[in-house]
Image (cartoon, rainbow, N blue to C red):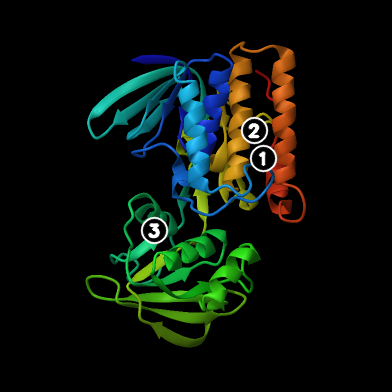
Amino acid sequence: MRETEVLVVGGGPAGLSAAIEAASFGAKVTLVDSDLALGGQLIKQTHKFFGSKNERAGTRGFKIAEELFRELKDKEENIETFTNCTVTGYYKEDGVVSCVKGEDEYFHIKPKKIVMATGAQERIIPFPNNHLPGVYGAGAIQTLMNVYGVVPGDRVLMVGAGNIGLIVSYQLLQAGVQVVGIVEAMDKVGGYWVHAAKVRRLGVPIYLRHTVKEAIGERFVEGAVIQEIDEKFQPTGNEMKVDVDIICLAVGLTPTCELLWQAGCKMAFVPQLCGYVAQRDKNMRTSHPDIWVAGDAAGIEEASSAMVEGRIAGVGVAKALGYGTQEEIEKRLKEYHGRLADLRGGEVGAKIREGIALCSVECWEV
């Protein structure tokens, strides 16, 4: 049994930010991540971020991860990290968390406070033969290329024209992989036009109101059939066969919240945030008095928002543990709330603001 003041579950942009922030007040933090290295999605992202100077606009994702790693090292006397380590359960009766490092090293942690920054899972759509080798989620493609330097194949069909689908298509093209087309079920491109323009300039067709009907192949993907659909997403047009060895699915993410369910947090289904999320107050505290949430586990947004939410959660747990002066706490929270409001401002953030309103509470009685 290990003991810690703060347990941060997840070492992506939100978890790293929460751990750094809590440790900056003097709290003892244990950071646990299931991947082989910290950084989450940041270490896969080679594109430049949008936003303001505070949110590192113009900086590539993996460079932002390096900046966070330096901050983490500066606080290493207060932060213990475990990678290749999965949190497997939360026990409500005593607040103990079970973990497994690798495949057979089990241990328990008894934290005083927890920040759940567990990220998101990729959605997979059903179609015949989607089990074949060669059908990937976009995150897996990014991991292969941008972390391990391995191209997944020669010819790719991208399914989904949101930001992830467009960005990964461009990264595939940069790696010398041919993207034969992008299919999108909606009647418009969902991602930023700047990303769509890049792939269109390189000759990649975008098929709106289309979907993948089936994968072709016996032992692995050898092609795909795409088909036009109507406004009710029913097949209506002619079928078209494309010669590909990779079908990449970029059809959205869902918050990873199993541990929040186990802990008994009050949950709400919020379509604008892409699934079930924990109800929380403005400082990211859930209905469980010892648990905060941040990042994609709190609702699917950009990594910039995840990092600011992580900072807010880190301040929240530090305050709950009695660290920091009231003036210092209020100053930091005011700054971070302002930055978060800027990120969610305007027409682009309207959907997120609607979702946040549906799962927010004024405060919890603790």
Instruction: Tell me the amino acid under the disc marked 1.
Output: Cys
Locate residue 236: give its quadrant: bottom right
Would you place residue 312 above or below residue 234 in this image?
Answer: above
Q: How crowded is mark 2: few (under 14 residues within 10 Å), some or many (20 or more)?
A: many
Say which residue appears at 53% left-offset and 15% top-offset.
27
Say which residue appears at 52% left-offset and 75% top-offset.
202
Would you place residue 289 above or below residue 273 in this image?
Answer: above
Say which residue appears at 60% left-offset and 28% top-offset.
313
Locate the C terminus and report the quarter of the image it occupies: top right
Q: Residue 141 carries which label?
A: 3
Instruction: Tell me the amino acid under the disc marked 3.
Output: Ile
The answer to whether mark 2 and mark 1 are in CB contact below 8 A is yes
Say which residue appears at 52% left-offset and 59% top-offset.
164
At mark 1, the secondary structure is helix
Comparing 366 with 50, the one in front is 50
At mark 3, the secondary structure is helix
Q: Residue 87 carries which label?
A: none
Q: Measured from the top left, where is residue 95 in percent x and y?
A: 45, 19
Q: Which of marks 1 and 3 is in front?
A: 3
User: Which badge, 1 or 3, comes first in the chain's sequence?
Assistant: 3
Q: How many labels does the image show?
A: 3
Task: For residue 117, say whether it is visible.
Answer: no
Locate residue 53: give its quadrant: top right
Q: Name the residue under label 1.
A: 359
Instruction: Tell me the amino acid under the disc marked 2.
Output: Arg
Locate the N terminus and report the quarter of the image it occupies: top left
Q: Residue furthest bottom?
A: 238
Task: For residue 102, say whether it is visible.
Answer: yes
Q: Measured from the top left, where is residue 215 in percent x and y?
A: 35, 74
Q: How crowded is mark 3: few (under 14 residues within 10 Å), some or many (20 or more)?
A: many
User: Which badge, 2 or 3, comes first in the chain's sequence?
Assistant: 3
Q: Residue 280 carries which label?
A: 2
